[in-house]
Image (spheres, grey):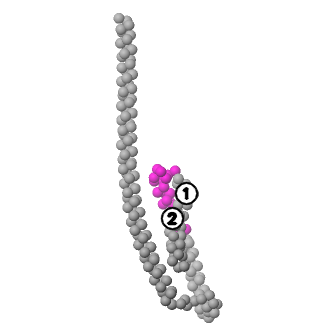
Amino acid sequence: MKAADDKIKVLEEEVRVLWATLRKNNFDIHVLESKAREAEDRLEMITSQAEKMEDIVSERWIQIQHFEQALQLKEMRLKAQRQARPPRWTFLNVFQLPFCEESALRAYVSQTFSWLKRFYSTVKESHHELQVFVKQEMERHEFTACLANKEIVFFMASALIIFPVLSAWILLSSQLC
């Protein structure tokens, strides 16, 4: 009788351990299912954001193509105008200007430098604003948040400003030559 009671106690203890393991496993399954649902929701949100960004990029690309076409048309018109009439100013003509025209040329050069200074300060201010925007956008996304340091943000903002200018310069210089 004693051996049977001991065997029953051992079996009851095994049942308690199995029930505890079952409860723990059920809890773990519930936690994993919850995390999977959260991950699916996040994936849907990120997919939606990516699709919106794709639409925006497509719209911008179309706008860029329209601007490029307009630029090419303008360049062709300017090229045709230049070929239709000879240039009025040559290098030697600049040195033979009368005094009144020299002062007009100096005023033009002065005005141009003034415009360049204003342009530089505007670009500098825009660069600082663009750095803030790039940093905020990088920190908003978990994949790029770890990259949002000063150097990377400066480089990205610089690239966003320089790339279109450099592209336009290359395009213009290839059309003018």
Where is 47 relative to 159, above or below? above
Q: Please report whichever mark, 2 or 1, sits nearer to the chain's N-terminal start.
A: 1
Q: In the displayed structure, does residue 172 sit left or right of residue 57?
A: right
Q: Amino acid at mark 2?
A: Leu
Q: x%, y% of residue 147?
A: 53, 53
> Between marks 2 and 1, how big is the CA–CA gap?
12 Å
Q: Which residue is mark 1?
A: 152
Residue 129 painted magenta: yes
Q: In the displayed structure, does residue 16 sit left or right of residue 112?
A: left
- Return the mark for residue 2: none
Q: x%, y% of residue 85?
A: 51, 90
Residue 13 painted magenta: no
Q: Residues within 10 Å of mark 2 (few under 14, many from 20)?
A: some
Q: Residues within 10 Å of mark 1 (few under 14, many from 20)?
A: some
Q: Quadrant of residue 90?
A: bottom right
Where is 154 relative to 12, above or below? below
Q: Which residue is mark 2?
A: 160
Q: Quadrant of residue 60?
A: bottom left
78 or 48, nearer to the observer: 78
**Total numbered labels placed on residues in the image:** 2
Q: Amino acid at mark 1?
A: Ile
- Quick one: which residue is furthest to the top in this view? 1
Q: Quadrant of residue 67?
A: bottom left
Q: In the displayed structure, does residue 103 sit left or right of residue 84?
A: right
- SS for dot 1: helix
175 or 110, nearer to the observer: 175
Q: Which residues are magenta?
A: 123-146
- SS for dot 2: helix
**Image quadrant containing the N terminus:** top left
Who's the residue at 50% across and 57% down the image? 135
129 or 3, nearer to the observer: 3
